[in-house]
Image (cartoon, helix red, strand yellow):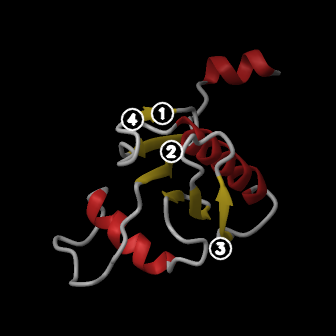
Amino acid sequence: MIWKTETHQFTATICQRTGKTCPAMARMARTLAQSVLTAGQSTTRDLEIEGSVELAYCASGCTARFSAQSDEVRVYCGVEADADVARLDGYANLMFGTEFTTLPSGMIPNPPCAMLQALALEPKKRTQTELRAST
């Protein structure tokens, strides 16, 4: 599933447990993307956050690992709370088509049941009419 907000383009896989997209993962990712965007206004572009959460509204009781930067947020569902984010990122690069062409052997012994990537969009440039209307 792919969708856009004013600030990000989101791409999510189908959950292998439910066979549907995960609204809990999508809500968490939207909130995280907005938080990193807001924090980025008062920090350097090097801001990075990693962690894990329990998705409260997931019927399967899912643990999600996440990584967030100013231009990209990724969420990995159904993985251990201490899963190696670098390995998960390699897997996501393959799945979302951003890097690898093949998955190295043994890279992900237990792949995520669902993943989401949010990429920051270029800020919309305001037209002269919009600028005049805001003053």
Query: Which residue is outermost to the front?
Result: 60
Q: What residue sits right under mark 4 in the picture?
A: 20
Residue toward you, 60 or 107: 60
Instruction: Determine the CA span between mark 1 and mark 3.
Output: 24 Å
Q: Are marks 2 and 1 in contact (CB under 8 Å)?
A: yes
Check residue 46 in the rendering and tell me which mark sits there, or answer none.
Answer: 3
Residue located at (78% from left, 20% from top): 134
Residue toward you, 81 or 32: 81
Question: Height in image: 30 above or below 105?
Answer: above
Direction from residue 5 to residue 3 in the image, left or right: left
Residue located at (73% from left, 50% from top): 35
In which quarter of the view is residue 2 placed?
A: top left
In which quarter of the view is residue 125 placed?
A: top right
Three-letter code, disc 4: Lys
Three-letter code, disc 3: Asp
Q: What residue sits right under mark 2 in the picture?
A: 121
Q: Are marks 2 and 4 in contact (CB under 8 Å)?
A: no
Q: What residue sits right under mark 1 in the picture?
A: 4
